[in-house]
Image (cartoon, rainbow, N blue to C red):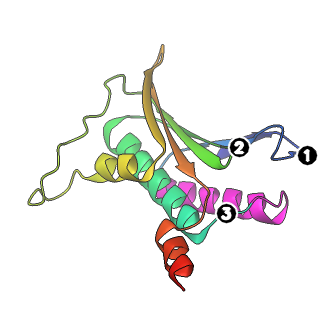
Amino acid sequence: MKQAADGEGWAPADESISLSAAFEGTEAIAEARDYARSFLHTLQAVHGVPVSVRAMGNVQLVVSELMTNAQKYAPGPHLLTLEADEGAVAVTVWDSEPRPPMIQGFDPVRVGQHGLEIVVALCRSFEVHREPVGKRIRATVDLAGDPIGDMANRAL
């Protein structure tokens, strides 16, 4: 894994913080998920950004699904960028395959190929951009609290 960082001294109100790393090999998906968890912990511990338990799990799941697809369908290394800004984390994965992913329609009896369905359901936004080489997929996950937990607390 190779990584780069910007946004040192980030103040959540006025700019973003981002980290990027390249992943390749059999452990790439687990390493990318760990990288995302570490990024979120740093947001909390160093920058004082609130990250809900729900967001912690959702970001890791989105990273896992996007990196799995990149590894499955595109040769070579894959670039993961995590960027926190305005109460959300953007998860961007670049890979060398130019074809955009196909999001399957809802089918409760289909086994597998539900990853992008899950990503789209969890995210504030989902975008696919073709690049001169390959494509870039960007999914934005809210850092806010658990809406179910929030509603349950209001009922008390």
Secondary structure state at the residue bearing disc 1: loop
Q: Which residue is mark 1?
A: 9
Q: Which residue is mark 2?
A: 19
Of badges 2 and 1, the one in the foreground is 1
Tell me the residue at 72%/62% (across/down): 50
Please indicate whether residue 41 sits to the left or right of residue 154 in the image.
right
Three-letter amino acid code of the residue under disc 1: Gly
Three-letter amino acid code of the residue under disc 3: Val
Residue 51 circle label? 3
Of badges 1 and 3, the one in the foreground is 3
Q: Which residues are magenta?
A: 28-49
Q: Are marks 1 and 3 in contact (CB under 8 Å)?
A: no
Residue 82: image x %, image y %?
Answer: 63, 44
Name the quarter where the C terminus is drawn: bottom right
Whether residue 134 is visible, yes or no, is no
Secondary structure state at the residue bearing disc 3: loop
The residue at the far top in this view is 132
Residue 70: image x %, image y %?
Answer: 40, 41
Say above or below: 11 vs 49.
Answer: above
